[in-house]
Image: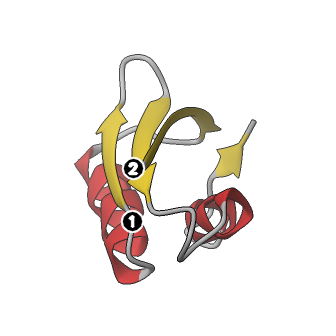
Amino acid sequence: MNKMTLQVEGMSCQHCVHSIEGALTEIGASGKVNLAMSTVEVMYDEGKISLETVKEAIEEQGYEVL
């Protein structure tokens, strides 16, 4: 399992947390959002999904991965 912390802009509330964490779950990853730090700690199996797929899942929810 890979563990990575991504800087994400545009998150401001619990809806953002649920949106991002739900999108990650749908692709087979898991994530923990930290609103105060504007980060998402992601765990994923690089044999099954790529980091690019993780970023796309977050960006499809309307947020910008830096």
At x 36%, y 18%, the residue is 36
Residue 42, percent from left and from top: 43, 46
* Observer-nearest of 61 and 55: 55
Amino acid bearing label 2 = Met
- Name the side, left or right, on which 49 lies relative to 32: right
Compared to residue 19, the image places residue 6 above or below, namely above
| Residue at the image point whose x is 32% and y is 72% from the top | 25
The residue closer to the viewer here, 5 or 19, is 5
Query: Viewed as shown, does residue 46 lie left or right of 31?
Result: right
Quadrant in the picture for residue 12: top left
Cα distance between the residues tagged 2 and 1: 6 Å
Instruction: Establish if 60 lies above or below 13.
Output: below
Judge the density around disc 1: few (<14), some (14-19), many (≥20) Cα neighbours within 10 Å.
many
Give the image location of residue 26, x and y in percent: 37, 82
Mark 2 lies on a secondary structure that is strand
Q: For the image shown, how many numbered marks are present on the structure?
A: 2
Instruction: Check the image and report above or below for 7 versus 60.
Output: above
Going by the numbered disc 1, the residue's amino acid type is Ala
Which residue corresponds to the image point at 70% horizontal and 48% vertical from the top-left?
64
**Percent position (x, y) of residue 60?**
63, 73
Q: Residue at x 60, y 38 (%)?
A: 8
- Residue annotated with mark 1: 29
In contact (CB < 8 Å): disc 2 and disc 1: yes
Query: What residue occupies the far front of the structure in this picture?
Result: 47
**Location of residue 9 in the rendering, given as x and y in whole percent from the top left corner:** 62, 37
Res 10 label:
none
Q: Which quadrant: the C terminus? A: top right
Label of residue 43 in the image:
2
Earlier along the polypeptide chain: callout 2 or callout 1? Answer: 1
Q: Is residue 50 above or below residue 51?
A: below
Q: Image quarter for residue 51?
A: bottom right
**Does dot 1 land on a helix, a strand or a loop?**
loop
